[in-house]
Image (cartoon, rainbow, N blue to C red):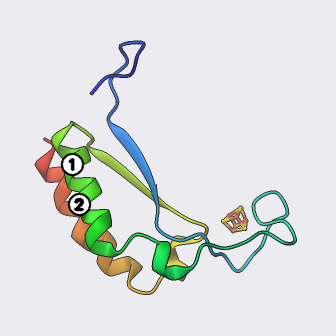
Amino acid sequence: MKDKYGREIEYMRISIMDRCNLRCQYCMPEGISLVPMEHILTFEEIELVCQAAAELGICKLKITGGEPLVRLGCPELIGRLKRFQELSR
Ligand code: SF4
């Protein structure tokens, strides 16, 4: 996949959680509203997005947040997403 300038896109960041315990001012200022958990992508939805991205040539995923480790099951999700690196090669 290429961007409009013809550069190859091989990398995607995906945020799996908007919460974090540290609450740095620039990221989580006072009064910021958090997304209700029912509006956050499920692991199955994240896998679907990553599968589609891998088919388009994305071979690197960066899992971000907030703090991704705050999300229950994060290590298992990362284990499940590793297979997409193999798919895109
Ligand atoms: S996600 Fe990063 S920047 Fe945001 S509050 Fe947490 S540590 Fe700070």
Q: Is residue 84 above or below residue 41?
A: above
Q: Within 8 Å of ligand 1, the CB of disc 1?
A: no
Q: Is residue 44 above or below residue 87?
A: below
Q: Is residue 57 left or right of residue 28?
A: left
> In terms of secondary structure, where does tag 2 sit?
helix
Q: Looking at the rendering, in which quadrant would you find the C terminus? A: top left
**Which residue does the numbered mark 1 point to in the structure image?**
52
Please name the residue shown 47% across and 80% down the image: 38
Count neighbours of disc 2 (C-alpha within 10 A) and say few if under 14, some if 14 to 19, many if 20 or more.
Answer: few
Q: Is residue 84 above or below residue 32?
A: above
Q: Label 2, label 1: how many angstroms apart (C-alpha)?
A: 6 Å
Q: Amino acid at mark 1?
A: Ala
Question: Could you say which is closer to the camera, residue 61 or residue 56?
Answer: 56
Please name the residue shown 12% across and 50% down the image: 87
Q: Is residue 75 left or right of residue 31?
A: left
Q: Is residue 14 above or below residue 3?
A: below
Q: Which quarter of the picture shows residue 14?
A: bottom left
Q: Position of residue 18 (x, y in %)?
A: 60, 69
Q: Is residue 54 left or right of residue 76?
A: left
Q: Amino acid at mark 2?
A: Leu
Q: Are marks 2 and 1 in contact (CB under 8 Å)?
A: yes
**Which residue does the numbered mark 2 point to in the structure image?**
48
